[in-house]
Image: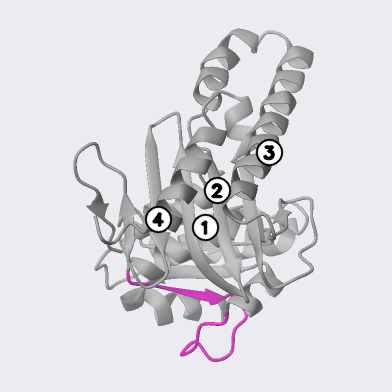
Amino acid sequence: MSYVSPLLTAFVNAVKKSASSLDRDFCELEQLQNSIKSNKNFVFNSYSRIEKNLKIELAKIRADLPIFTSSDKVSCSSYFAVSPIDGIANFAHGNPNFAVCAALVENDVIICSVVYNPSRDETFFAEKGKGAYKEGYRNHERLRVSATKELNGSLISSNFDSENIVNSTKILTSINAKTGDLRISGSIGQDLAYLAGGKLDAFVCLNSHISSMAAGILLVKEAGGSVRAIDQKDIRVEDIKQIFASQNLVASNFNLSQKVFEIFK
């Protein structure tokens, strides 16, 4: 298929190979729920194994690029941004809302990305200028954001910034008041992938690391959506560097872009 380049094919394969043990680990977690210590050690080992695997596999694609996770400070313009288990609290509790996220960034531009949820066997991928897709057995599904035009009745998801409880509560209350329906799934990467596929109408991200946002950002943009920093003054432009610097974003279909921003005013 012409839209799946050799680079993107290698990228998807690297992520799925790195996470090959994660589905088995997830199934075993249910039997560890009665032992808190065992559960914590098991989750830590799973995360560490995926992180190590990602670094090995992605180095085969571009050995010259550093690999940043949520614990790293990004210090250059070209790199891999990865979240080995995005939604790790969900994973630890046997909740299937988690994903492995990876993005290739070159000169502050997201080139390709993958969001993979092994518990649901869902793989979302995108390459700049070539669209966003969900992997299928025979044919891949082209992702498109929803066509929802009004906040009332729309479905918006967000995360909760535990470092700024007052601000988070204020923002989430405002969103719920305008829409009447708010979701917090616990996985930023998965939410952005679902937004790209039209299962959500908008997503508001509060105080998150590049590693959780980057892969989903490209999915949304390539699916026809809008991605902006939450405090951006001019919403006519998209500035990825500003989004990464602020660690807050608003993603939606274009019909809702202005209306979602009005919530925060």
**Residue 31 appears at what percent x and percent y?**
59, 8
Which of disc 2 and disc 1 is earlier in sequence? Answer: 2
Q: Closer to the N terminus: mark 4 or mark 2?
A: 4
Q: Does the residue at mark 1 contact the one at mark 3 (Cβ under 8 Å)?
A: no
Q: What is the CA distance from the residue labelled 1 to the residue labelled 2? A: 6 Å
Please name the residue that numbered disc 1 is placed on: 215
Dot 1 lies on which element? helix
Say whether marks 4 and 2 touch (CB < 8 Å). Answer: no
Q: Amino acid at mark 2?
A: Cys
For the N terminus, the image quarter is bottom left
Q: Earlier in the sequence, mark 1 or mark 4?
A: 4
Secondary structure found at label 4:
helix
Q: Kindly identify which residue carries mark 4.
A: 6
User: Which is in the foreground here, disc 1 or disc 3?
Assistant: 3
Q: CA distance from mark 4 to mark 2?
A: 19 Å
- Answer whether residue 74 is magenta in the image: no
Residue 160: x %, y % from top left:
64, 52
Q: Nearer the viewer, mark 1 or mark 4?
A: 4
Secondary element at tag 2: strand
Q: Is residue 135 above or below residue 257?
A: above
Q: Main secondary structure of the magenta part?
A: loop
Residues at marks 1 and 4, CA–CA distance in whole angstroms: 18 Å
- Judged left or right of residue 132, residue 247 is right
Q: Which residues are magenta?
A: 224-239
Residue 215, given in percent of the width and then of the height, sits at: 52, 57
